[in-house]
Image: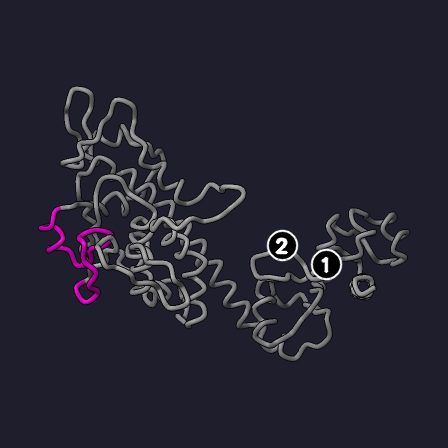
Amino acid sequence: MKLATHNQRFHLDEVTSTAILKKIFPDATLKRTRDPKDFEEADIVYDVSGVYDPTRGRYDHHQRGFTHTFSEAFPIKLSSAGLIYKHYHKQLFKYYGLVAEDWIVDEVYEEYFKYVDACDNGVDLQCTIVPRTMVDLVSCFNVQETGVKEDTKNGQMKNEVGGATTAGSSARVHSSCTVPLSDTLKDFVLSDNYNDYNFLCALNLISIDMDNYFRQKKQLVEMVSANHDLIRSATGDILVIGPDRDLSREALFILEKIWKKDFLFIVYDSSEHVRMYGTIKERNSYAIKVPLCLEWGGLREEELRARSGIEGSTFVHSSGFTGGAKDLKSALEMCRRSIKKSQE
Protein backbone atom coordinates (compact mmCIF):
# COMPACT_ATOMS: atom_id res chain seq x y z
CA MET A 1 0.00 0.00 0.00
CA LYS A 2 1.44 3.36 -1.09
CA LEU A 3 0.21 6.56 0.53
CA ALA A 4 0.92 10.11 -0.59
CA THR A 5 0.34 13.53 0.95
CA HIS A 6 1.98 16.93 0.51
CA ASN A 7 5.47 17.79 1.70
CA GLN A 8 6.83 20.95 3.41
CA ARG A 9 4.76 22.46 6.25
CA PHE A 10 2.30 19.98 7.72
CA HIS A 11 -0.96 20.45 9.58
CA LEU A 12 -3.18 18.58 12.00
CA ASP A 13 -5.57 17.28 9.34
CA GLU A 14 -3.11 15.29 7.19
CA VAL A 15 -1.20 14.13 10.27
CA THR A 16 -4.48 12.81 11.67
CA SER A 17 -5.34 11.23 8.31
CA THR A 18 -1.95 9.54 8.27
CA ALA A 19 -2.48 8.18 11.79
CA ILE A 20 -5.75 6.55 10.67
CA LEU A 21 -4.28 5.03 7.53
CA LYS A 22 -1.15 3.79 9.30
CA LYS A 23 -3.31 1.84 11.75
CA ILE A 24 -5.47 0.33 9.00
CA PHE A 25 -2.53 -0.38 6.68
CA PRO A 26 0.44 -1.06 8.99
CA ASP A 27 2.76 -2.08 6.14
CA ALA A 28 2.05 1.02 4.05
CA THR A 29 4.70 3.52 3.03
CA LEU A 30 4.18 7.26 2.72
CA LYS A 31 5.65 9.68 0.24
CA ARG A 32 5.36 13.37 1.12
CA THR A 33 5.42 15.09 -2.25
CA ARG A 34 3.75 17.53 -4.61
CA ASP A 35 4.84 15.74 -7.77
CA PRO A 36 1.83 14.53 -9.84
CA LYS A 37 3.89 11.55 -11.00
CA ASP A 38 4.09 10.36 -7.39
CA PHE A 39 0.33 10.71 -7.04
CA GLU A 40 -0.17 8.40 -10.01
CA GLU A 41 1.89 5.69 -8.31
CA ALA A 42 0.08 5.98 -4.96
CA ASP A 43 -2.94 3.94 -3.89
CA ILE A 44 -4.27 6.67 -1.58
CA VAL A 45 -3.58 10.40 -1.98
CA TYR A 46 -4.90 12.84 0.61
CA ASP A 47 -4.80 16.58 1.36
CA VAL A 48 -3.16 17.24 -2.00
CA SER A 49 -3.73 16.71 -5.78
CA GLY A 50 -6.92 18.77 -6.15
CA VAL A 51 -9.05 15.65 -6.60
CA TYR A 52 -11.79 14.05 -4.52
CA ASP A 53 -12.65 10.66 -5.97
CA PRO A 54 -13.07 7.80 -3.46
CA THR A 55 -13.18 5.24 -6.27
CA ARG A 56 -9.57 6.15 -7.08
CA GLY A 57 -8.43 6.71 -3.50
CA ARG A 58 -8.17 10.50 -3.90
CA TYR A 59 -9.12 12.64 -0.91
CA ASP A 60 -8.31 16.32 -1.34
CA HIS A 61 -10.57 19.10 -0.08
CA HIS A 62 -8.82 22.27 -1.31
CA GLN A 63 -10.26 22.39 -4.84
CA ARG A 64 -12.91 24.85 -5.96
CA GLY A 65 -16.43 23.50 -5.57
CA PHE A 66 -15.65 21.06 -2.75
CA THR A 67 -18.52 21.32 -0.23
CA HIS A 68 -18.72 17.83 1.26
CA THR A 69 -19.59 17.35 4.94
CA PHE A 70 -19.64 14.24 7.10
CA SER A 71 -23.44 14.14 7.08
CA GLU A 72 -26.45 16.47 7.13
CA ALA A 73 -26.09 16.64 10.92
CA PHE A 74 -22.67 18.28 10.63
CA PRO A 75 -22.53 21.40 8.40
CA ILE A 76 -18.75 21.87 8.65
CA LYS A 77 -16.83 21.21 5.43
CA LEU A 78 -14.46 18.25 5.63
CA SER A 79 -10.69 18.43 5.78
CA SER A 80 -8.57 15.44 4.79
CA ALA A 81 -9.05 14.08 8.33
CA GLY A 82 -12.84 14.09 8.03
CA LEU A 83 -12.64 12.62 4.54
CA ILE A 84 -10.42 9.73 5.57
CA TYR A 85 -12.56 9.08 8.66
CA LYS A 86 -15.75 9.19 6.58
CA HIS A 87 -14.48 6.61 4.10
CA TYR A 88 -12.39 4.42 6.42
CA HIS A 89 -14.19 4.54 9.78
CA LYS A 90 -15.37 0.93 9.51
CA GLN A 91 -11.80 -0.31 9.16
CA LEU A 92 -10.66 2.03 11.94
CA PHE A 93 -13.35 0.78 14.30
CA LYS A 94 -12.41 -2.81 13.48
CA TYR A 95 -8.79 -2.01 14.34
CA TYR A 96 -9.91 -0.86 17.80
CA GLY A 97 -12.36 -3.71 18.31
CA LEU A 98 -15.47 -1.54 18.02
CA VAL A 99 -18.66 -2.12 16.06
CA ALA A 100 -19.37 0.82 13.75
CA GLU A 101 -22.92 1.55 14.90
CA ASP A 102 -24.32 4.84 13.64
CA TRP A 103 -24.50 6.54 17.03
CA ILE A 104 -20.89 5.84 17.96
CA VAL A 105 -19.60 6.70 14.47
CA ASP A 106 -21.30 10.11 14.70
CA GLU A 107 -20.16 10.61 18.28
CA VAL A 108 -16.52 9.93 17.43
CA TYR A 109 -16.72 12.34 14.51
CA GLU A 110 -18.23 15.05 16.70
CA GLU A 111 -15.76 14.56 19.53
CA TYR A 112 -12.54 13.92 17.64
CA PHE A 113 -12.66 14.81 13.94
CA LYS A 114 -15.12 17.70 13.65
CA TYR A 115 -12.68 19.91 15.53
CA VAL A 116 -9.90 19.07 13.06
CA ASP A 117 -12.18 19.86 10.11
CA ALA A 118 -13.31 23.13 11.67
CA CYS A 119 -9.78 24.34 12.39
CA ASP A 120 -8.46 23.43 8.95
CA ASN A 121 -11.35 25.25 7.26
CA GLY A 122 -10.99 28.42 9.29
CA VAL A 123 -14.09 28.03 11.44
CA ASP A 124 -13.81 30.39 14.40
CA LEU A 125 -14.11 28.41 17.63
CA GLN A 126 -15.49 30.90 20.13
CA CYS A 127 -13.91 30.69 23.56
CA THR A 128 -13.35 33.26 26.30
CA ILE A 129 -10.13 31.57 27.33
CA VAL A 130 -8.07 30.46 24.34
CA PRO A 131 -6.86 26.89 24.97
CA ARG A 132 -3.65 25.32 23.75
CA THR A 133 -4.91 22.85 21.19
CA MET A 134 -3.77 19.87 19.14
CA VAL A 135 -3.40 22.29 16.23
CA ASP A 136 -0.84 24.22 18.28
CA LEU A 137 1.02 21.06 19.27
CA VAL A 138 1.35 19.85 15.69
CA SER A 139 2.25 23.32 14.41
CA CYS A 140 5.19 23.54 16.81
CA PHE A 141 6.81 20.52 15.16
CA ASN A 142 7.33 22.68 12.06
CA VAL A 143 9.91 24.83 13.86
CA GLN A 144 13.36 24.87 12.24
CA GLU A 145 16.68 25.41 13.90
CA THR A 146 18.13 28.91 13.45
CA GLY A 147 20.37 29.04 10.40
CA VAL A 148 18.55 26.27 8.56
CA LYS A 149 16.35 27.38 5.69
CA GLU A 150 13.74 25.55 3.67
CA ASP A 151 14.20 25.06 -0.04
CA THR A 152 10.55 25.55 -1.01
CA LYS A 153 11.12 24.29 -4.53
CA ASN A 154 12.59 20.93 -3.57
CA GLY A 155 11.19 20.62 -0.06
CA GLN A 156 14.69 20.09 1.30
CA MET A 157 16.59 21.83 4.05
CA LYS A 158 19.68 23.93 3.40
CA ASN A 159 22.28 25.17 5.83
CA GLU A 160 23.91 28.60 5.76
CA VAL A 161 26.35 27.62 3.00
CA GLY A 162 23.68 26.06 0.81
CA GLY A 163 24.33 22.38 1.34
CA ALA A 164 21.18 20.30 1.05
CA THR A 165 20.44 17.58 3.58
CA THR A 166 17.82 14.87 3.79
CA ALA A 167 15.53 13.72 6.56
CA GLY A 168 17.35 10.41 6.62
CA SER A 169 20.75 11.89 7.38
CA SER A 170 22.00 15.11 8.93
CA ALA A 171 18.59 16.76 8.72
CA ARG A 172 17.74 14.91 11.90
CA VAL A 173 20.41 16.91 13.68
CA HIS A 174 18.34 20.01 12.96
CA SER A 175 15.00 18.43 13.83
CA SER A 176 12.90 20.17 16.48
CA CYS A 177 11.82 16.73 17.69
CA THR A 178 13.73 14.96 20.44
CA VAL A 179 11.34 12.02 20.85
CA PRO A 180 12.84 8.66 19.82
CA LEU A 181 10.83 6.91 17.13
CA SER A 182 10.24 3.23 16.53
CA ASP A 183 11.84 1.56 13.51
CA THR A 184 8.33 1.17 12.08
CA LEU A 185 7.87 4.93 11.92
CA LYS A 186 11.45 5.65 10.82
CA ASP A 187 10.95 3.48 7.74
CA PHE A 188 7.46 4.80 7.01
CA VAL A 189 8.24 7.97 5.02
CA LEU A 190 10.05 7.53 1.71
CA SER A 191 10.57 11.15 0.58
CA ASP A 192 13.49 13.40 1.47
CA ASN A 193 11.68 16.56 2.59
CA TYR A 194 13.55 18.59 5.18
CA ASN A 195 10.96 18.16 7.92
CA ASP A 196 9.98 14.50 7.48
CA TYR A 197 11.39 13.57 10.87
CA ASN A 198 9.40 16.34 12.53
CA PHE A 199 6.32 15.11 10.67
CA LEU A 200 6.89 11.65 12.13
CA CYS A 201 7.20 13.10 15.62
CA ALA A 202 3.87 14.88 15.18
CA LEU A 203 2.39 11.66 13.78
CA ASN A 204 3.65 9.77 16.81
CA LEU A 205 1.93 12.26 19.12
CA ILE A 206 -1.41 12.12 17.29
CA SER A 207 -1.23 8.33 16.97
CA ILE A 208 -0.80 7.91 20.72
CA ASP A 209 -3.64 10.34 21.41
CA MET A 210 -5.90 8.49 18.98
CA ASP A 211 -5.10 5.17 20.68
CA ASN A 212 -5.92 6.62 24.09
CA TYR A 213 -9.14 8.19 22.84
CA PHE A 214 -10.41 5.00 21.23
CA ARG A 215 -9.45 2.86 24.23
CA GLN A 216 -11.47 5.20 26.42
CA LYS A 217 -14.33 5.16 23.92
CA LYS A 218 -14.31 1.37 23.78
CA GLN A 219 -14.41 1.22 27.57
CA LEU A 220 -17.41 3.57 27.57
CA VAL A 221 -19.26 1.54 24.93
CA GLU A 222 -18.63 -1.69 26.85
CA MET A 223 -19.76 -0.02 30.08
CA VAL A 224 -23.01 1.14 28.48
CA SER A 225 -23.62 -2.29 26.94
CA ALA A 226 -23.04 -4.11 30.24
CA ASN A 227 -25.49 -1.97 32.23
CA HIS A 228 -28.62 -1.83 30.08
CA ASP A 229 -30.51 -4.33 32.26
CA LEU A 230 -29.57 -2.53 35.47
CA ILE A 231 -30.79 0.87 34.31
CA ARG A 232 -33.89 -0.48 32.58
CA SER A 233 -35.10 -2.13 35.79
CA ALA A 234 -33.94 0.54 38.28
CA THR A 235 -36.49 2.82 39.95
CA GLY A 236 -36.34 5.94 42.10
CA ASP A 237 -33.87 8.81 41.92
CA ILE A 238 -30.90 7.17 43.67
CA LEU A 239 -28.98 4.45 41.80
CA VAL A 240 -26.88 2.03 43.87
CA ILE A 241 -23.97 0.27 42.16
CA GLY A 242 -22.43 -2.81 43.75
CA PRO A 243 -18.72 -3.71 43.70
CA ASP A 244 -19.30 -6.17 40.85
CA ARG A 245 -20.26 -3.42 38.40
CA ASP A 246 -18.42 -0.61 36.67
CA LEU A 247 -20.45 2.44 35.65
CA SER A 248 -19.18 5.98 35.14
CA ARG A 249 -21.35 9.07 35.34
CA GLU A 250 -20.87 9.58 31.60
CA ALA A 251 -22.08 6.05 30.83
CA LEU A 252 -25.02 6.59 33.19
CA PHE A 253 -25.93 9.79 31.34
CA ILE A 254 -26.10 7.86 28.05
CA LEU A 255 -28.19 5.11 29.62
CA GLU A 256 -30.54 7.64 31.21
CA LYS A 257 -31.28 9.05 27.77
CA ILE A 258 -31.82 5.59 26.28
CA TRP A 259 -34.16 4.39 29.03
CA LYS A 260 -35.69 7.77 29.89
CA LYS A 261 -34.55 7.72 33.51
CA ASP A 262 -33.59 10.64 35.75
CA PHE A 263 -31.33 9.65 38.63
CA LEU A 264 -30.12 12.40 40.97
CA PHE A 265 -27.38 10.45 42.74
CA ILE A 266 -25.25 7.42 41.94
CA VAL A 267 -23.95 5.52 44.98
CA TYR A 268 -20.99 3.14 44.75
CA ASP A 269 -21.22 0.54 47.51
CA SER A 270 -18.08 -1.45 48.29
CA SER A 271 -16.95 -3.51 51.25
CA GLU A 272 -14.55 -0.79 52.43
CA HIS A 273 -16.55 2.42 52.00
CA VAL A 274 -19.48 3.99 50.18
CA ARG A 275 -19.08 6.89 47.76
CA MET A 276 -21.85 9.02 46.27
CA TYR A 277 -21.89 11.45 43.33
CA GLY A 278 -24.45 13.88 42.01
CA THR A 279 -25.40 12.95 38.45
CA ILE A 280 -24.43 15.33 35.64
CA LYS A 281 -26.87 17.61 33.80
CA GLU A 282 -25.10 17.34 30.46
CA ARG A 283 -22.72 14.83 28.89
CA ASN A 284 -19.60 16.99 28.89
CA SER A 285 -20.36 19.19 31.87
CA TYR A 286 -19.33 19.31 35.50
CA ALA A 287 -22.71 20.76 36.51
CA ILE A 288 -24.76 18.33 38.59
CA LYS A 289 -28.52 18.07 39.02
CA VAL A 290 -28.50 18.10 42.83
CA PRO A 291 -25.51 18.65 45.15
CA LEU A 292 -25.13 17.19 48.60
CA CYS A 293 -26.31 19.71 51.21
CA LEU A 294 -24.12 22.77 50.79
CA GLU A 295 -23.88 23.33 54.56
CA TRP A 296 -21.96 20.04 54.68
CA GLY A 297 -19.47 21.15 52.04
CA GLY A 298 -15.82 20.78 53.03
CA LEU A 299 -16.60 18.99 56.31
CA ARG A 300 -15.16 15.65 57.43
CA GLU A 301 -15.62 12.98 60.07
CA GLU A 302 -16.75 14.30 63.50
CA GLU A 303 -17.41 17.83 62.27
CA LEU A 304 -19.60 16.50 59.45
CA ARG A 305 -21.42 14.06 61.70
CA ALA A 306 -22.13 16.82 64.22
CA ARG A 307 -23.52 19.10 61.50
CA SER A 308 -25.52 16.47 59.58
CA GLY A 309 -26.60 14.19 62.38
CA ILE A 310 -25.79 11.20 60.16
CA GLU A 311 -23.53 8.86 62.14
CA GLY A 312 -21.90 7.09 59.21
CA SER A 313 -21.06 10.18 57.13
CA THR A 314 -17.33 10.71 56.50
CA PHE A 315 -16.86 13.66 54.11
CA VAL A 316 -18.49 15.99 51.61
CA HIS A 317 -16.59 17.84 48.88
CA SER A 318 -16.71 21.62 49.19
CA SER A 319 -18.82 21.88 46.01
CA GLY A 320 -21.18 19.10 47.09
CA PHE A 321 -20.67 17.00 43.96
CA THR A 322 -19.43 13.97 45.93
CA GLY A 323 -19.22 12.59 49.42
CA GLY A 324 -18.48 9.46 51.40
CA ALA A 325 -19.94 7.31 54.15
CA LYS A 326 -19.05 4.26 56.21
CA ASP A 327 -22.15 2.32 55.17
CA LEU A 328 -24.90 2.27 52.56
CA LYS A 329 -27.63 3.31 54.99
CA SER A 330 -25.78 6.53 55.85
CA ALA A 331 -25.00 7.25 52.20
CA LEU A 332 -28.64 6.90 51.18
CA GLU A 333 -29.70 9.18 54.03
CA MET A 334 -27.21 11.82 52.88
CA CYS A 335 -28.65 11.64 49.37
CA ARG A 336 -32.29 11.74 50.50
CA ARG A 337 -31.68 14.73 52.77
CA SER A 338 -29.93 16.55 49.95
CA ILE A 339 -32.77 15.88 47.50
CA LYS A 340 -35.32 17.12 50.02
CA LYS A 341 -33.23 20.24 50.66
CA SER A 342 -33.08 21.00 46.94
CA GLN A 343 -36.87 20.87 46.73
CA GLU A 344 -37.49 23.38 49.53
- 172 sits to left or right of 250: left
Q: Which residue is mark 1?
A: 275
| The quadrant where residue 262 appears | bottom right
Q: Which residue is mark 2?
A: 286
Q: Which stretch is magenta?
A: 35-56
Give the residue displayed 43% in from the left and 59% down from the top.
Answer: 214
Tag 2: amino acid: Tyr
Give the residue displayed 35% in from the left and 45% down from the top.
Answer: 204
* Residue 279 location (% of width, % of height): 67, 62
From the viewer's side, name the closer residue of 110 and 203.
110
Question: Could you tell me which secondary element the residue under label 2 belongs to?
Answer: loop
Tag 1: amino acid: Arg
Quick one: label 2, few (<14), some, or many (20+) residues within 10 Å?
few
Q: Quadrant of the N terminus?
A: bottom left
Give the residue displayed 21% in from the left and 54% down from the top.
Answer: 63
- 39 sits to left or right of 179: left
Residue with the most extreme bottom position: 233
